Structures are given as C-alpha cells and as structure tokens.
Image (cartoon, grey):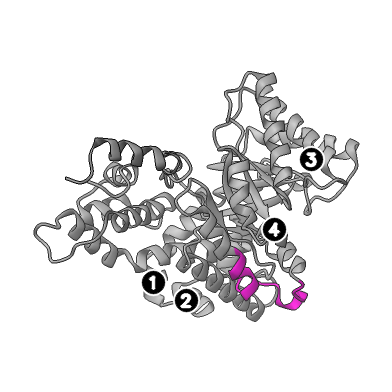
Amino acid sequence: MSLDKNFFDQASKLVAGADHLLTTKYRGDFGGRQPIHTCYVPADKLSATTPADWGATALITIDEHTPTPASFAQAVGCQESSIAEIFDRVKAKLAREPIEDLRIDFEDGYGRRGDEQEEKHLEGVLKVYGSLRVPFIGIRMKAMEEVTRTRALKTLDRFVTGLIEQGGYPGNFIVTLPKVTFPEQVDVMVAACEKIEKDHGLSPGTIRFEIQIETTQAILDQQGRATAAQYIDRAQGRLSAFHYGTYDYSAAAGISSAYQTLDHPAADFAKSILQVAIAGTTVRISDGSTNILPIGTQPEVHAAMHNHYRLVRRSLERGIYQGWDLHGSQLPTRIAATWIFYRDGLNAASLRLKNYLNSAQSGTMDEPATALTLARYFLRGLDCGAIESHEVEKLTGLDEQGLRTIVVNKGNI
C-alpha cells in the first residue's frame, strides 16, 4: 500500500477541526418535540385562562363559520375527506391543548411603558405563570438596541430570578431575543445568561434563547457573509431557533405594507439563508405570522382561513414546521393544515421507511439520511397529534422509541 500509518495520522491531524465541528456544531437535530406554533400574548393581557380563552375562540370560529367538515373544507380549499377524518380530533385538541408554545411579550406587542409599569406587569405575569399549562412557554424581551437594551436585560434578569424563587428554572422555558442586528448583541445576551446562571447556581447553558430575525443585517452582513451563521457560533450552544419576523423584516427590506407577507420573494430568500445556516445543527427554524385574522363577516372569515391554511401548508412543504399565531381564531387552520400535511404523506412515507428497514428483501435502497428524515417526519406527526402511535406501528412496525433510535443513530439501524 502507498498509504501507511504515518499518512493516516497526518490526515487525521489535518481534519481534526472538521471532525470536531461534525460532532459538536453539526450533530443534527436532537429529535425532541418542536411545537407547531408560537402564540404571542402581550404581558399586560396575559391571564391564567389565556390558553383556554384561545381554545374557546377557536371553537367558536369553527361553530359559527365552518361547523361541518364540508364547510371547513370549502373555506380552506382542502379535500372534504381529509378534514372529515380529523375534524372531531381537531376540536378535541382545541379544548385540551390549544396552545403548544406561549410567548409572553414585553416587546412590540407590549410597547414601551416605562420601568415602573413593566415591573408591575412582570410581577403580574409571574403570579399566574404556575397556572399556565402549556408544553412550551417563554418571554420575548426587548431588543439589544441602545434605546431598549437596559430595560431588556432588567426584564430578563428579574423574570428568571422570579422563576427560580418559585421553585426553579423550568425546562420548557425559552427566551426570545428580537431584532438582532449584529453578532455583538448575541455576545451581550450570552454574557447576561452566564452572569445570571452563576449568581443563582444554575448549570452553565441552562438559559437558552431563540433569535427573531427582523433585520436585513441578520441575513447578510456588510461583507456579504451570512450573519445568522455567525449567531450560532456566538451563542455558544444556547441558541434553540431562528424565528422569522414577517413585518419588521419586510419593512427593513423596503417592501410596501400591502405586500408584507410570508410568501413574498424577499421572505423566501431570508428563510432560505436561515435554513442553510442551521442545516445539520441543533438549531431550528420557525416561520412568522400573518395579521389577516379570521374575523368579521363569513366571507371575510373564510378568506382569512383560506389564506392562513395556504401559508401554513406552504411553510410545511418548504421544511419549516413551526410558525407564529396572533389570535385564537387562527388555531383551527394551523392545526388542520399541519395535521393534513402529515396525513397526506403517511402511506408513502410508511412504505418507504418499511422498505428501508427491510432493504435486503425490497427493491428500494435509501440512504441513512433519508431514513432519518422519514423518522423525523413521523415523530413530528406524533408529537403534534396528527398521527397516532397505533397507526405508525401498524404501518412501519416501529414504535415511538424505535423512531427516536433512528434519529439518535442518524438514520443507521
């Protein structure tokens, strides 16, 4: 052989840095549950009944405007058979778990109230926090821009302190950092998290945050580099997701208000950059919101439902599995569009995964990466309720643990 041990040792030294990145930064999605949406509530409007109130609003929207599978299908533009098989289950979820991720807002939806008033509302939120039964929850603090930076950091500090005083830092808690423009703002956030953790005896890395992408500088910096990719490194393992901010980003890109939508080409460009930046990492992506609400006359409600259903489905088809909702009336179309997306591909995905698992006996050979994608598809469907566990076991022969094993092993069995 021409290549001896000395060559192999030198080769290992040359790619040691790349090996380290592959096992740390690019170790892939961890396979845990991702909420299908983030629901946004100003801090002064939050109450112990907020999740139930949103669910009640959603059910009223269905009862008054789309009371049957046929009327719902006509409103959103889907097949009646698709909604008929899940219609009652959608309503049951709205009664049981209408909100998957609740974000208590101290930023744009809340406004600038002055220190005294924000402290008062912060204390009010902490009082009802323990009664909020949602899978995921967090706050959106103000931005790191000069005019709001001190107030943002005070709210972060006081809120985390309040949570710890109530019994400890919750594992399902996340902080949204909005309007990040430059990597140095991420550095400040990391430093603040480190200081709070140290002072309260929390393990390093306990406080995690997501970044809301609302400025063009967050996509490309002044040298034309992908800024979001820099944010991942600067966050030092604390970053959980990028959330696209529809209206602030559109305005920053110079798009007229009438055309500020999730499906504008400028929005697609920004989200494509984000998807490339996070690919292979543990960081996820969430789409933004639409402010066209299903409120008003029946034609207006149906038009808004159709638009929201279309946008949710569009995001899912493009590999973005989460978005923001602004009102309880948007929940029926969020859940229905998500569930139908997973159920539409259920049989084909099941067959393909089964063929992979039995590749020696089948005529189909897929790569481990494909098996990984299929396993994640089923897990997302299971996590949100679109697919039931007995269906997966019947179609693939795997239970939930078997699917998560494929994710942990990156598609290898």
Name the residue tied to disc 4: 221
> Which range is magenta?
254-270
Residue type, mark 4 in image: Asp
- State yes or no: residue 127 in magenta: no
Establish if 322 lies above or below 52.
Answer: below
Q: Is residue 52 visible?
A: yes
Name the residue tied to disc 3: 152
Q: Which residue sits at x=61%, y=39%?
A: 132
Establish if 411 lies above or below 155.
Answer: below
Q: Is residue 102 visible?
A: no
Disc 2 to disc 4, C-alpha distance = 44 Å
Q: Which residue sits at x=54%, y=49%?
A: 100
Residue 73 - label: 2
Mark 3 vs 1: CB contact within 8 A: no
Residue type, mark 3 in image: Ala
Q: Secondary structure at mark 4?
A: loop
Residue type, mark 2 in image: Ala
Name the residue tied to disc 1: 82
For the N terminus, give its image quadrant: top left
Mark 2 vs 1: CB contact within 8 A: yes
Mark 4 vs 3: CB contact within 8 A: no
Quarter holding residue 152 = top right
Crowd tier of the residue under label 3, counting other residues whose Cα lies within 10 Å: few below 14, some 14–19, many 20 or above? many
Q: Nearer the viewer, mark 2 or mark 4?
A: 4
Position of 243 with respect to 409 (left or right) is right
